[in-house]
Image (tube, helix red, strand yellow):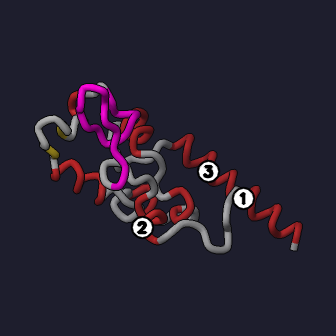
Amino acid sequence: MIDLNQGPCAIRRLRGCSCGNEYVAVTPSGDIYPCHQFVGQEEWKMGSVLDGSLNLEMKDRFALANVYSKPECRNCWAKFYCSGGCNANNWQYGGSVRKPHKISCELEKKRLECAIMIQAALA
């Protein structure tokens, strides 16, 4: 289901997932990670609910990971629908939260093309 007429809010269109900001993962031991897919990777530990620590620099790093900070996204026609993709996938497959995962990009573009074709056929 894709809403081609309204879609998500402006922040969601720019940043995609709210990883590390509006969304975090907390482990049973109290460790805070930007999302569940980063759990267990020590370099991504943001802090702990037990001692009240939170790495605000990492939070800001994720807040700044948007379609304008990702060179591959800047001129992409689909950028406001995929919003640069999943940060965890970008890290896992591209080595950076600012380097989109190419296969995910291609799948999202094809998904959008199909949605646009269906909407045009129904019009």
Measured from the top left, where is residue 12 in percent x and y?
46, 63
Circle count: 3
Classify 70 as above or below 52: below
Say which label, 1 or 3, has the lower sequence index: 3
Residue displayed at 37% across by 40% down: 35
Point out the image quarter for the C terminus.
Answer: bottom right
Residue 57 at x, y percent in the picture:
16, 51
Left/right placement of residue 111 relative to residue 121 reads left
| Residue at 25% in and 38% down | 32
Give me the residue at 44% from left, 52% from top: 17
Q: Which residues are magenta?
A: 22-39
Q: Vertical placement of 91 versus 5: above or below?
A: above
Q: CA distance from mark 1 to mark 3?
A: 9 Å
Q: Quarter of the image holding residue 94?
A: top left
Q: Depth check: 75 or 104 in front? A: 104
* Crowd around label 2: few <14 · some 14–19 · many ≥20 (10 Å): some
In terms of secondary structure, where does tag 3 sit? helix
The amino acid type, in three-letter code, at marker 1 is Glu
Q: Which one is nearer the viewer's eye here, 20 or 99?
A: 20
Q: Which mark is residue 113?
A: 1
* Marks 3/2: CA–CA distance: 19 Å
State which tag comes first along the sequence, 3 or 2. 2
Measured in 3D between alpha carbons, the distance from the residue under mark 2 to the one under mark 1, in whole angstroms, is: 23 Å
Please, what secondary structure does the residue beneath circle 2 have?
helix
Which residue in the protein does label 3 denote? 108
Q: Quadrant of the N terminus?
A: bottom right
The amino acid marked with disc number 2 is Ile
- For label 1, the SS is helix
Q: Is residue 31 left or right of residue 35?
A: left
Q: Which residue is mark 2?
A: 11
